[in-house]
Image (spheres, rainbow, N blue to C red):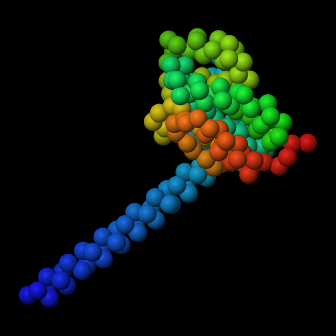
Amino acid sequence: MEGARQALSMPRIHSGLTMKRILLSALICIAAIGASAQLPQTTIKDAKGRPVNTATLSNDGKPFVISFFATWCKPCLRELQAIAEVYDDWRDETGMKLYLVSIDDAQNTSKVKPLADAEGWEYDLLLDPNSDFFRAMGLQAVPHVLVVDGDGKIVHNHSGYTDGAETELIDIIRGLSKPAK
């Protein structure tokens, strides 16, 4: 009887290890798929109120960053200020650009451009007041940063901000960039 119990419990241990391997493989596949996804097609607006199709965001074959933020989000503001301090150098070195996408609701979109102007942010400002683009990307919280390569594939996806995280961001962009001439 003891041998039968051991025989019955062995497959459970084995199947538990197999299940862990299957889950790990699935997570790796999901990450790989997410890391090479294209931008979804949704319509948002630029700072002048003109419609922008998100699937057409590009940077002439060079990498770009999409940063989702809200005016009320303190970590967002810290991240954007940290990037602003080095943005000109990054653009000169890599040719990258940053699309700043506000998810502030319609009542607060009037605060977005004055904030960007006051901070001196030279980013391409986009407004997503219904969070259509944000939801189409499957995002949950701001700040959220995407790095898109020159072919329009999402190669990096990061939520949250800690001081110094912009260093990782430029390292990724440098890996994708050819020096600007």
Residue 169 visible in the picture: yes
Q: In the displayed image of the protein, which residue is found farthest to the right?
A: 181
Q: In the displayed image of the protein, which residue is found farthest to the left?
A: 1
When asked about the image quadrant of residue 81, the answer is top right
Asked whether 122 or 56 is in front, the reply is: 122
Asked whether 69 or 74 is in front, the reply is: 74
Residue 144 visible in the picture: no
Residue 96 position (above or below residue 78) = below
Q: Residue at x 66, y 29 (%)?
A: 82
Percent coordinates x, y for residue 147 in the rendering: 65, 43
Asked whether 11 or 105 is in front, the reply is: 11
Quarter of the image that includes the N terminus: bottom left
Q: Residue at x 57, y 44 (%)?
A: 157
Picture mark count: 0
Q: Is residue 91 left or right of residue 147?
A: right
Percent coordinates x, y for residue 43 in the rendering: 59, 29
Residue 123 position (above or below residue 27) = above
Residue 14 position (above or below residue 169) = below
Q: Residue at x 59, y 26 (%)?
A: 78
Percent coordinates x, y for residue 167 in the rendering: 67, 42
Quarter of the image that includes the C terminus: top right
Q: Residue at x 58, y 12 (%)?
A: 111
Percent coordinates x, y for residue 114 in the rendering: 65, 11
